[in-house]
Image (spheres, rainbow, N blue to C red):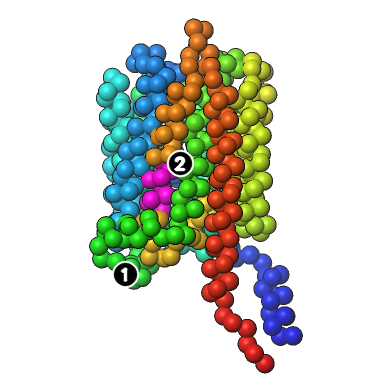
Amino acid sequence: MLEKTANSNAATAPPPSFTPYQKFVAGMLAFLQFAVILDFMVMAPLGAMIMPALKIAPSQFGMVVSAYAFSAGISGVLAAGFADRFDRKKLLLFFYVGFLGGTLWCAMAQTFPSLLAARIVTGLFGGVIGSVLLAIATDLFQAQLRGRAMAIMQTAFAASQVMGLPAALYLSTRWDWHAPFLMIVGVGIVGGLVVAWRLKPVVGHLGSHNESNPFKHLLRTVSERRHLPAFAATALLTTGGFMLMPFSSVFTVNNLGIHVDQLPTIYLVTGLCTIVTGPLIGKAADRLGKLKVFYAGSVLTSVMVMLYTHLGPVPLPAVIVVNVVLFIGIFSRMIPYQAMASSVPELHMRGSFSAISAAIQQLAGGVAAVVAGHLVTTAADGRLQGFANVGYVVVGSTLLAGFLATRVHREIRQREAAAQPAPAVS
């Protein structure tokens, strides 16, 4: 009877809440994500300006987008062996300074080779930041709070649409496409100073580290059986965004008939809606179950991708509605999956697991951007042809990711059940 009462009280107990420091950390992680995501996302809407300015074809622009992803993936693999050997705060600041340097180079680039090289350097540093942020969030937030923590971090994506992209587009039309990168550097410097001043050292993982050889630590993380389905699901989930985003502005302007000056409105409304829904999705994942919310998001994403990639000329309100619902579906996949995958590695492997996951994400995204660049062509009137084929690939990858996410969830549950103490025998 006492055991049943205790279980009942645990089930009805209110969910834990953030401490004041956790609130600061969550906001800081979201701000840094904002800078890194904006640096990548700004390439898509600027594509309509960069391609004519540098006189490059869609395939070349796809190379610029994928160069960041490939270099980020390579650096993630190289950093994985060392990711659990240092204070995560110091590791974050090192890569963040390099990221700002690469972004400044982008602001100075005047030719296609220079821009390509700048994106490679930016990716080498920026690609590791996301994995360090994820490892910090996993270390500082218990499992019952990670859905909400991941949701706050994901709102950086929406905030970049609400505040970053409209400002970047305004600056690019007011001056030229270089100006948004200068803006990112200026905002990013402020964020770096706050991190250096307020973030406490994150060293809890150092006491549990038992592998002195970085190469062996990398191999152990890669070869761990339960990590493999999570890595594969990460690669497949990445495919959608990286295949749709690089050509979204070109498709919206040339195929849907939306004027380039109306693009900020689309990003603004979509971003505002996802800022509101993101935390709600995180709470739902914590309370209803991460896998259930993931399934719902996958279904919604698949439906909206098929609708979006088959659209013809439509009014602006219709484009906004489609974009809003599509991004809600994407968020409903990514937030619960990230919260779920954070429970896969042991403490002493979190940094390397996150780094490898980020590397796989970037490499898969780079492949996706290149493939998308070859699936679509530009007609004489500027319209994209073959964009529906991109939608088919995205839906197929979503279905496979759902199967793998189910395996990840089952493995976590089995491990949690095995760790529970045996019931007392009366």
- Dominant SS of magenta comes to helix
From what the image shows, is residue 23 above or below residue 1? Answer: above
User: Residue 36 in the image: x percent, y percent?
Assistant: 41, 40
Q: Residue 39's x, y, as percent? A: 40, 34
Residue under the image location 27 percent in, 57 percent down: 215
Quadrant location, the N terminus? bottom right
Residue sitting at the far bottom: 426
Spatial CA span between label 1 and label 2? 34 Å
Query: Which dot, 1 or 2, sits closer to the camera?
Result: 1
Q: Which mark is residue 260?
A: none
- The structure residue drawn at horizontal position 42% and vertical position 49%, both measured from the top left corner, is 357
- 287 or 337, nearer to the observer: 337
Residue 387: x and y in percent read: 55, 22
Q: Which residue is mark 2?
A: 34
Q: Residue at x 57, y 16 (%)?
A: 255
The mark nearer the N terminus, 1 or 2, is 2
Residue name at image x 38 percent, y 58 percent: 223
Crowd around label 2: few <14 · some 14–19 · many ≥20 (10 Å): many
Residue 107 sits inside the magenta stretch = no
Q: Is residue 327 above or below residue 168?
A: below
Point out the stretch of residues depicted in magenta. 354-362
